[in-house]
């Protein structure tokens, strides 16, 4: 797979194992419409999960906050080579009584496609060696715990669902659905969809290592999505003639001695 674009990602190093240069991947991040959000919302609704917010708008995620507004947990969805994966992004500042605060922005995924409440919390505890996430009940309290529990149900419901038609319509091997919090209200926010995002920013190497990601993208581009090719630039006949050397200095227009004397 030959990659064309300015984006660098974590699986680029796998090209050292060999690549098919006849297969071209135009790697460029673009914003997408809400079509995939409607499809994801339907998946959740069919499985009995409410996909609307307190404000009557579509919301795949209700953010959970820790002991301060500076720390929150948001759902992040990755569509990769035909399937959906989801994790929880911990973002903000963790107050640690025994040391300086820890600033963090990282996504945690369930292991082997199976999600448990304590499993994600233990991943965070192990990663940052803090007791901030020791128990869900002491961290969130009754109401916030229910929001986090809902996030877990959303991840369980989405993990592994196949959406081939969405990938073909986007003509992209992967995409990302991110949650953006409103600056005005703690629980208000929107979801944005990007095709071909930077996967390392979503810590997707926790789900697929560099070799797996490179191989799956190559096979998906070569077997499912339409073949990509660099855009051709139209060149005028006049420019083509000059490129071949037929200009004022070519053999068709020899310089005369009288012109050199001038």
Image (spheres, rainbow, N blue to C red):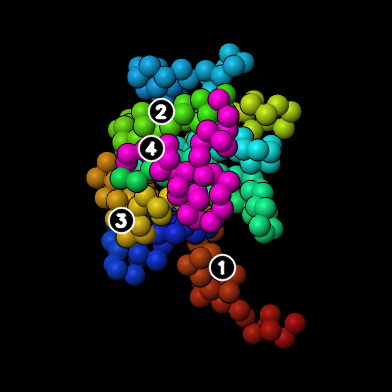
Judged by depth in the image, the label closer to the viewer, 2 or 1, is 2
Q: Residue at x 35, y 65 (%)?
A: 15
For the residues labelled 4 and 3, the Cα–Cα distance comes to: 25 Å
For the residues labelled 2 and 4, the Cα–Cα distance comes to: 9 Å
Name the residue tied to disc 4: 116
Judged by depth in the image, the label closer to the viewer, 3 or 2, is 2
The answer to whether residue 163 is above or below residue 250 is above
Few, some or many residues within 10 Å of mark 4 (<14, 14–19, 20+): some
Judged by depth in the image, the label closer to the viewer, 3 or 1, is 3
Name the residue tied to disc 2: 153
The answer to whether residue 50 is above or below residue 1 is above
Few, some or many residues within 10 Å of mark 1 (<14, 14–19, 20+): some
- In the drawing, what numbered circle is on residue 212? 3
Is most of the magenta stretch helix, strand or loop? helix
Point out the tag, 2 or 4, that comes first from the N-terminus: 4
For the residues labelled 2 and 1, the Cα–Cα distance comes to: 70 Å
Cβ atoms at labels 4 and 1 below 8 Å apart = no
Name the residue tied to disc 1: 247
- In the drawing, what numbered circle is on residue 258? none
For the residues labelled 3 and 1, the Cα–Cα distance comes to: 52 Å
């Amino acid at each position: 797979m030959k990659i064309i674009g300015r984006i660098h990602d974590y699986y680029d190093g796998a090209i050292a194992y060999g690549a098919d240069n006849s297969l071209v991947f135009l790697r460029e991040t673009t914003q997408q419409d809400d079509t995939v959000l409607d499809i994801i919302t339907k998946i959740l609704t069919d499985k009995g999960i409410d996909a609307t917010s307190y404000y009557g708008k579509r919301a795949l995620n209700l953010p959970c906050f820790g002991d301060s507004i500076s720390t929150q947990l948001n759902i992040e969805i990755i569509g990769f080579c035909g399937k959906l994966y989801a994790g929880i992004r911990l973002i903000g500042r963790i107050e640690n009584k025994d040391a300086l605060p820890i600033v963090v922005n990282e996504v945690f995924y369930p292991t082997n496609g199976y999600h448990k409440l304590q499993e994600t919390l233990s991943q965070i505890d192990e990663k940052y060696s803090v007791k901030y996430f020791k128990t869900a009940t002491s961290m969130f309290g009754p109401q916030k715990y229910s929001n986090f529990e809902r996030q877990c149900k959303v991840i369980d419901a989405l993990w592994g669902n196949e959406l081939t038609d969405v990938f073909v319509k986007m003509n992209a091997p992967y995409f990302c659905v991110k949650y953006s919090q409103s600056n005005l209200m703690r629980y208000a926010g929107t979801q944005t969809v990007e095709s071909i995002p930077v996967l390392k920013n979503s810590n997707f190497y926790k789900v697929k290592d560099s070799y797996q990601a490179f191989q799956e993208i190559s096979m998906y581009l070569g077997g499912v999505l339409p073949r990509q090719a660099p855009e051709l630039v139209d060149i005028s006949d006049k420019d083509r003639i000059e490129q071949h050397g037929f200009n004022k200095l070519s053999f068709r227009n020899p310089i005369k001695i009288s012109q050199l004397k001038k």
